[in-house]
């Protein structure tokens, strides 16, 4: 008969008497730190870099201007030589520059330099600016618009700001009654055609075509037709004279001024 196993003795271990977890709950205040309100980066742009970029652009534009001016030298040289009727050999003798160098300058295969250009402009007797090309010259012609001032036709022959202005005045025969005036300044007259009557202080004179007069306008004066026909005059006036002589007068005035 199989022996029985002895039963295990009952457990006599002491019960778990560990104190329960009485640690205080986490009462730390929540994170109430203010959000990042730092101002955005408003630092000024790098002015040094901007200045450098502007300088670079300016230098590039200057370089382009130089290149453009030099590019026109060759055609001008060829045109000048053709106008003067000179051969390369003849120009070479005048300048001391070889024919091959002159030819290469004209076709743009040789960069112009002062060492080469100065003998050439001396030979042609022209300023260097004419050869290398200066700024474009505006049309110098003046196209005056006629206007009527008290029966006379007035054309302004100057347009630039200046202390003096030139006018062409065509005075009709009926403007022949003296009406003297005076003002600061000086005046010049030139009779282009006809006969001009000039009254200056106590003088009463007649100027023929081709004659001129000048006088201090502080003296009482008047000029107009003699009554025999129209007269064409060139006037050079200062600001005061322009205001007095070139203004529109009342219709009942019959003066030449």
Image: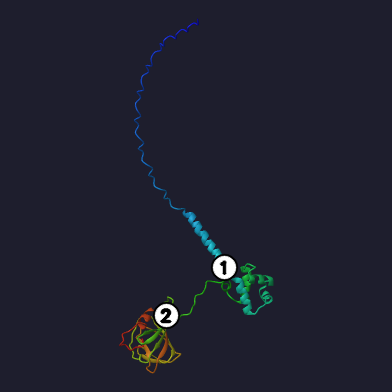
Q: So how many labels did they put on this image?
A: 2
Q: Which part of the image, by quadrant, shows the C terminus?
A: bottom left
Badge 1: how crowded within 10 Å, few (<14), some, or many (20+)? few
Q: Is residue 241 left or right of residue 123?
A: left
Q: Is residue 14 left or right of residue 108?
A: left
Residue 244: % across, % down: 35, 82
Badge 2: how crowded within 10 Å, few (<14), some, or many (20+)? some
Q: Furthest residue to the bottom?
A: 228
Up-down relation of residue 64 to residue 125 (above or below): above
Report the residue marked by disc 2.
Answer: 165
Is 15 or 222 nearer to us in this picture?
15
Can residue 61 be seen at all in this image of the molecule?
A: yes
Mark 1 vs mark 2: which is more N-terminal? 1
Report the residue marked by disc 1.
Answer: 68
Determine the residue positioned at 52% across, 60% down: 57
Residue 67: % across, % down: 58, 66
Q: Is residue 22 left or right of residue 105?
A: left
Is 119 or 172 nearer to us in this picture?
172
Query: Quarter of the image holding residue 200?
Result: bottom left
Q: Furthest residue to the top?
A: 1
Label 1 element class: helix
State which mark lies toward you, 1 or 2.
1
Up-down relation of residue 93 to residue 146 (above or below): above
């Amino acid at each position: 008969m199989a022996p029985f196993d002895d039963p295990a003795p009952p457990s006599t271990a002491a019960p778990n008497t560990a104190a329960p977890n009485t640690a205080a709950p986490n009462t730390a205040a929540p994170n109430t730190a203010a959000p990042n309100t730092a101002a955005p980066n408003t630092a000024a742009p790098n002015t040094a870099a901007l200045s450098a970029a502007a300088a670079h652009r300016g230098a590039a534009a200057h370089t382009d201007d130089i290149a453009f001016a030099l590019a026109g030298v060759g055609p001008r040289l060829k045109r000048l030589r053709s106008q003067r009727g000179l051969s390369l050999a003849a120009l070479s003798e005048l300048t001391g520059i070889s024919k091959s160098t002159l030819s290469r300058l004209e076709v743009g295969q040789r960069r112009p330099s002062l060492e080469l250009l100065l003998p050439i402009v001396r030979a042609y007797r022209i300023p260097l600016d004419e050869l290398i090309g200066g700024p474009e010259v505006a049309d110098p012609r003046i196209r005056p618009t006629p206007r009527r001032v008290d029966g006379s036709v007035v054309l302004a022959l100057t347009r630039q700001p200046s202390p003096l202005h030139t006018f062409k005045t065509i005075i009709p025969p009926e403007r022949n009654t003296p009406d003297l005036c005076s003002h600061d300044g000086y005046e010049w007259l030139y009779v282009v055609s006809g006969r001009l009557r000039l009254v200056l202080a106590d003088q009463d004179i007649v100027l023929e075509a081709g004659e001129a007069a000048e006088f201090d306008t502080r003296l009482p004066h008047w000029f107009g037709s003699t009554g025999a026909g129209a007269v064409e005059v060139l006037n050079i006036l200062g600001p005061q004279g322009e205001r007095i002589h070139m203004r529109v007068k009342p219709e009942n005035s019959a003066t030449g001024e």
